[in-house]
Structure formats: C-alpha cells, structure tokens
Image (cartoon, rainbow, N blue to C red):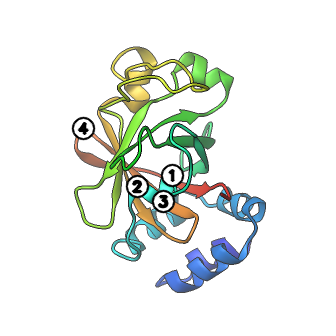
Amino acid sequence: MNKLNELLATKPIDLDAVRAHLDSLSHAERVKEMRTVGLRLQRDLFNAADGYMPLDVDHFVPKGVANKTFVKHYGKNSLPLFSDFEKHFARPVDDAREAWGFNESGEFVKTVVGPGWFITRKGDKDGEVDIDYYRIPGRHIDGAPPLKKNTSGLSYFVYGNMVDVMRKVSEHVTIGNAVKNGKRTDNYFLLSREEI
C-alpha cells in the first residue's frame, strides 16, 4: 500500500497531510499513486473534501495558459473497466467564466462512446466546480476531436444527463462525483493536473 492509500485509510482523513503528501510528489509520482486509489477511498475523500479548499475554473486552466490551449488532467475513476483516463480543458476566450473540455479514454472508448464533450463552470455550491455534460462548446477547438452531443448512442449512457461535481484536494488534485439525472451516483474519480 502506498502512502496516499495509507493516509486515506486512516479515519478521520487528515486532509492537510493528504495535501502535503500530494504536493511533495512529482507529477509522475502523483499520478502513479492516485491511480491506485479504489472506490471506497475515493468516496471517503470526496465526502471529506467538502468545503476543504475553494475551487474555481482557473484550477483546470490556470491563468497564463493561452486561450484554446488544452491542459491535461490525468484521471482514475472508480469503475471496473477503462478506469485510467484524461480530461482535457481549455479556456475559449480571455476572462471566460467557463472552460471547455473533453475526455480522452483511448481509441476504443473514443470510437464507440465518443469524447464526452463538456462545459466546466462554477458549481451550485460555493467552492465547487461542475463539469456539465448537458452542454457542449459552441465551436470546435483545433487539435480536439469533433464536437458531439452526449444525447445519442452509447454516449448517452455514459455522459448523458450528467454533471461531475468537483472538489479540491491539493495544488494539482481534485476529486469528483458523478451526478446523473440530478442524483448522486456511487461513481467517483481523481484528477491530477499536468505541470504548467
């Protein structure tokens, strides 16, 4: 068991210790440890992180990143298959209050399900950010897959009627919970932003 799992398994979770540990790791080390965390500990972390650190859209695309430039966040979800993935976020214009993005889960998932385009915006609760699959960007960004709504085919079953509620854990790491049709699910995921 790595240190991140040990910290998350200790109850109550010491979020300051989790944050310090994650911030001490290199990007590669952080992603490696994060991708070992299973459903139960992801759920525990999401619940513990409620109100811990303020989160805004700038976390996903930091100030200074050029418009229409994608920032990668490396993910680990709690599903049994295709659990390693990426979310790519970009700011469409200066001073945008939202970011646009899509999922990168490998060629098979992208071909069969689609990229799962979304809009990232301020959450309904202060300090949270929502990744909203009900909406997709108004136009394409160069270098990204074609725009596709999440309302048809297999994309509907994966991304349709969904919002991911995001909470901040450390400088680079967030934890999310999928909300389908307005109801929380037992699906969680961790994201670690690439070094900028």
In which image quadrant can residue 53 be found?
bottom left
Instruction: Say which of 48 and 64 sits in front.
Output: 64
- In the picture, the disc for residue 57 is 2
| Image x and y of residue 61, in percent | 51, 52
Task: Write the residue at 41% across / 72% down.
Answer: 49
Residue contact between numbered discs 1 and 2, judged by CB atoms under 8 Å: yes
Q: Which residue is under mark 1?
A: 61
Which of pointers 1 and 4 lies earlier in the amino acid sequence? 1
Mark 4 is surrounded, within 10 Å at the Cα level, by few (under 14), some (14 to 19) or many (20 or more) other residues, namely few
Q: Nearer the viewer, mark 4 or mark 3?
A: 3
Check disc 4 and give the amino acid type: Asn
Check disc 1 and give the amino acid type: Val
Task: Check disc 1 and report its element: helix, strand or loop.
Answer: loop
Residue contact between numbered discs 2 and 3, judged by CB atoms under 8 Å: yes
Q: Which residue is under mark 4?
A: 181
Check disc 3 and give the amino acid type: His
- For this orientation, the residue located farthest to the top is 153
Residue 58 placement, left or right of 16: left
Check disc 2 and give the amino acid type: Val
Instruction: Say which of 88 and 80 sits in front.
Output: 88
Task: Check disc 4 and report its element: helix, strand or loop.
Answer: loop
Q: Quadrant of the C terminus?
A: bottom right
Task: Check disc 2 and report its element: helix, strand or loop.
Answer: helix
| Image x and y of residue 59, in percent | 48, 59
Residue contact between numbered discs 2 and 4, judged by CB atoms under 8 Å: no
User: Height in image: 42 above or below 118?
Assistant: below
Q: Quadrant of the N terminus?
A: bottom right
Which of pointers 4 and 3 lies earlier in the amino acid sequence? 3
Q: Which residue is under mark 3?
A: 59
Q: CA distance from mark 1 to mark 2?
A: 7 Å
| Image x and y of residue 182, in percent | 22, 44
